[in-house]
Amino acid sequence: MEVKMAVERARWAATGDGEPRSGGALGSRAAAGCGQWRRCGGRHCLAGGDGGWWRSAEWRRWTREKRDGRAAAVGCCVMGVAAQLMEVPNTMWGFRSSSTLANIFLLLLVAMIFSVSHVSASKQFKNETDRLALLEFKKQIYNDPSGVLNSWNHSQHHCQWEGVTCGTRHQRVIALTLRHKQLSGPISPQVGNLSFMRFIQLGENQFHGEIPQEFGRLFRLRVLNLSNNALGGKIPANLSYCSELINISIHDNKLEGKIPIDQLSSLQKLEYFSLRTNNLTGEIPSSIGNLSSVIGLALDFNNLEGKLPMEMGLLRRLAQLFLGANKLSGIIPASIFNSSAVMIISVADNYFHGNLPINMGLTLPNLGELFLGINEFSGNFPISITNASGLEVLDLSSNKFAGQVPTNLGDLTQLKLLNLERNLFGGNSTGDLDFIASVTNCSDLSTFSLSYNNFGGNIPKVVANLSNQLTTLYLGDNQLSGTIPQGFGNFVNLIRLGLEENYLSGVIPRDFGKLQNLQLLSLSQNELSGQIVPTLCNATGLSELDLSTNQFEGGNIFDNVLMNCQNLQYLDISQNNFTGIISPHFLETHSSLIAMVLSENSFTGSLPPEVGKLVHLVNFSVSHNQLAGAIPISLADCSELENLYMEANFFQGTIPPNLASWKSIQKLDLSSNNLTGPIPRELEKLQYLRIGVPSLPSD
């Protein structure tokens, strides 16, 4: 009101009758000032000869422009016109005195002050909108263990709050970055009022509820990261209005329903689209081919089904494709294998079938990772793949590939993972593993699996020249024969070694004692013999050891060999020729054991009461040995025990009543012993219970 009165007073002072003069020299000179106006703001002249600039269309346009925050330009132009007015002698204006000219200056000055004050008020109002939206966001957060939102209060400007970034020009919120803050609560719809927002980074928290539909109002949004939360509901289709989006990362949530690709395909700037690890369903529609800028597409670990649309081949910039762990089927469109931009293809754990393109190694020169495992692909090994010289990961596991592996596979010198397990490779012939000689060129190879195929012949001695970076080597469940060659001790970084289910014979090589990082060793179901090398447990981190179903022998294996394996969790030495007692000291010092299978050997003596120290034991079998004495009452301390097999020994006495305290027991076999007395009533409820023949009476 005060500003309005000042304007009225200025208008009155200009003419003395409340009506300003116009036309004539004033209109002409003001029109001539348009050059200055254009230099200031690129707009038209303020004044004209039509009865006063404050009533003109230009005045109305000017008031709109100052509402848009362009007061500086307007002020510049006002001053420019004023400056030109000052350059003209009074006689050229038709005024009788200099006071009239001064009044005009006053009028212009008041108008400029009004403009600046109005713009300031408008800017303050918009800033207030942002502040209130942020406070509503905070209001929804009911758990903030790190106190990151403590700074969100009236003591400082909201642009200084933690996680809030404002633009320097308008002081409007452009980014909200609160990742890894352990925040819990729903996301306030008021975030949709932050109209200048460009980056939302709320990943790795515990946000729940649905993604607000109001996000569709954030027309300037470029990055939306809500990953690793507990958000549910459907993906808002109106995100399609956020035409500036480059990155949508909403993976690792609980989203459900269909992917609104038909709407989101309008996002022509979208480069990264990650929806992995949700509960999304439905098919992938053909409109996905409209996402012409997409570089990374991650839809894996959902419940998507159906065939891949041919239009996916239109994504010419696509470099990373993740579709694994869904229910997709059919044949992968050949066009996907024809894009030179592709670096990663991951379609594992689906129902895809068919042969791979013969020339795929030529059409995918930049391929770095290929995951095709757990599907129904068939045909021979894609020989041309050796042309993809940058390939680091090749996983063809759990398919129906057959034939021989090419002997030039080692041309892939960058390989780090080679997984061919669970196929039909090989022909049970002596030359099946000849290709390993070339694989020795892969100096960075860390994972190498050939298990569950039809490879025959001996393990070649050249295997000892494989990369010393190997951490995993699986050759199990083939038709391999002969002895285990020396040289495995070269794999000083080896963590897992599997040679099970072959026809290997002879003894365990002594250089196995050099495998000090070994955590898993499986030699089961072979024809190995002799005594276990005492240095086997130099690998103090060994947690899984399976020597079952061989012809190993020796007495006191627990104290002489296994004692140093301090971290054993799974031990199976069943179906061998071991003798001696079950060491009380071993039981007392290996409480980490979860499974211990000693059946079908020739162990003697009693079952020591120290067995009660195995408090994590789930599976325990000492069946078919020559153990005698009473069943130790300390077995009741094995509270997690589910399966206990003690049949075919010489145990005697009664079944300890306290065994009825077991809560997890599912299977119990005490048959073929010399037990007497009643059966604890609680044990009678077991679905699998074998006590003896004839059955003991119940209590």
Image (cartoon, rainbow, N blue to C red):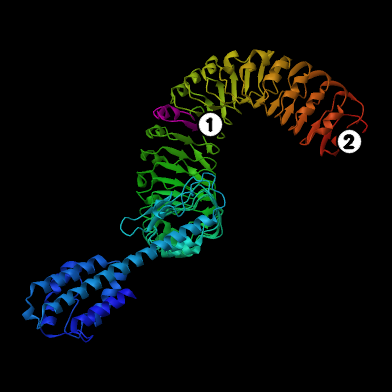
In the rendered image, the vertical position of residue 314 relative to residue 631, given as above or below: below
Observer-nearest of 644 and 172: 172
Residue 684 in picture, x, y percent from top left: 87, 36
* Residue 589 appears left or right of 155: right
In the rendered image, the vertical position of residue 310 relative to residue 659, given as above or below: below
Tell me which amino acid carries mark 2.
Answer: Arg
Residue 224 seen: yes
Magenta residue span: 432-450
The residue that label 2 is drawn on is 681
Mark 2 and mark 1 lie on one chain; the one further toward the N terminus is 1
Observer-nearest of 8 and 346: 8
Residue 223 in picture, x, y percent from top left: 41, 54
The residue that label 1 is drawn on is 455
Residue 263 in picture, x, y percent from top left: 45, 65
Residue 391 in picture, x, y percent from top left: 39, 39
Q: Residues within 10 Å of mark 1 (few under 14, many from 20)?
A: many
**Residue lying at 8% horizontally and 78% vertically, measured from the top left:** 90
Tell me which amino acid carries mark 1.
Answer: Phe
